[in-house]
Image (spheres, rainbow, N blue to C red):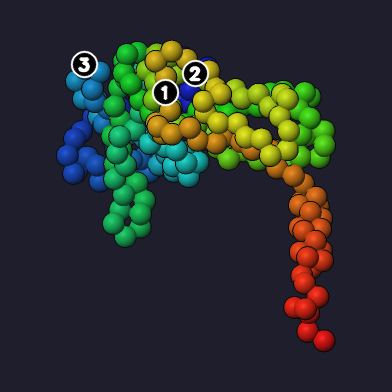
Amino acid sequence: MAGNTPDIQALPRTGTGKGAARSARREGLVPGVVYGGGADPLPINLPYNELLKLLKAGRFLSTLFNLKMEGQEDVRVICRSVQRHVVKDLPTHVDFMRLRRTSRVSLFIPVEVEGEDECPGLKKGGVLTMVRPEVELRCTAGDIPEKITISIAGLEIGDTVTISSVTLPEGTRPTIDRDFVIANLSAPAGLVSSESEDEDEVAADEVPASAVEE
C-alpha cells in the first residue's frame, strides 16, 4: 500500500434530504455519501474550502483517499461522482465508494527516475523529457504502488523509455494497452538548430548549377 495516501476529513451528517443538504451548504459544508464495501451508506459533510483545494489539485476522481471522521474507523475511499452547480460549477454533492483490499481501481501513480549518473546522453548535454510524469495503473486497493521507477542508465540521445521496460507489481497493469512512451532523451536545442543549419547548407550545395537563376 502506498505510504502517502492523502487524508480527507469528513463530518457526520445527521439529516438527509434536500433540507439537510441546503442547511449544510449554508454552513460552508458539502454533503456527500459513502457507500459500498458491504456496509450501509454513510451520510457525511465535507468542509467546502478543503474539498475545493483537493478538486483544484486535479486527479480527484482517480485518487485513493483515507477518509477520517470522528467516531468512525478510517476507511479507504475513491470518489465516484461530484455533482456541481449548473451555473457556478461549484461542488454541491460528493459520492465516495469504500474499497476492500481486493477491490480493483484505476489510479495515477507518479514516476521516479534513476540512473542519471550513468546516462551517456545526459553527459553529452541531452535533455530528459517526462512525457508521462504519472502513469494510470489498474491495481488492487491492497497493493497500490507508491511510485514506479524507470532507469535511464546507458541511454543515449534519441532513446526512449516505454512502459514495457517497467517492472510492475503482480496484478497491476497499465490502463492503456499499447507500449506508450514515459520519457525520452532529446538533443539540446542548440545542437538541433546547428544540425538543421548544416542540413540546409548541404541541401543548397546539392542544387544543380543549371537550376540557379542569375
Give the class, few, some or many, for how many residues have Cα within 10 Å of label 2's Cα (few <14, many ≥20): some
Q: Is residue 45 above or below residue 4?
A: below
Give the class, few, some or many, for how many residues have Cα within 10 Å of label 3's Cα (few <14, many ≥20): few
Q: Earlier in the sequence, mark 3 or mark 1?
A: 3
Q: Earlier in the sequence, mark 1 or mark 2?
A: 2
Note whether residue 44 is visible. no
Q: Are marks 1 and 2 in contact (CB under 8 Å)?
A: yes
Q: For mark 2, give the secondary structure.
A: loop
- Residue at 35% from the left image edge and 13% from the top image edge: 101
Work out which residue is located at the far front of the displayed protein and give it. Answer: 210
Note whether residue 106 is visible. yes
Mark 3 and mark 1: Cα distance apart in space: 26 Å
Q: Which mark is residue 38?
A: 3
Left or right of 106? Residue 165 is right
- Of badges 3 and 1, nearer the viewer stands 1
Q: Based on the displayed image, in which of its 4 quarters is residue 98 positioned?
A: top left
Q: Which mark is residue 173?
A: 1
Q: Where does residue 68 sit, x and y in percent of width and height?
A: 40, 22
- What amino acid is found at the position of numbered circle 3 in the picture? Gly
Q: Which residue is mark 2?
A: 168
Q: Where does residue 188 sit, x and y in percent of width and height?
A: 77, 46
Mark 1 and mark 2: Cα distance apart in space: 7 Å
Give the class, few, some or many, for how many residues have Cα within 10 Å of label 1's Cα (few <14, many ≥20): some
- Of badges 2 and 3, nearer the viewer stands 2
Work out which residue is located at the far bottom of the displayed protein and give it. Answer: 214
Q: Where does residue 39 sit, x and y in percent of width and height?
A: 21, 17
Q: Are marks 3 and 1 in contact (CB under 8 Å)?
A: no
- Residue at 17% from the left image edge and 39% from the top image edge: 17
- What amino acid is found at the position of numbered circle 1 in the picture? Arg
Q: Are marks 2 and 3 in contact (CB under 8 Å)?
A: no
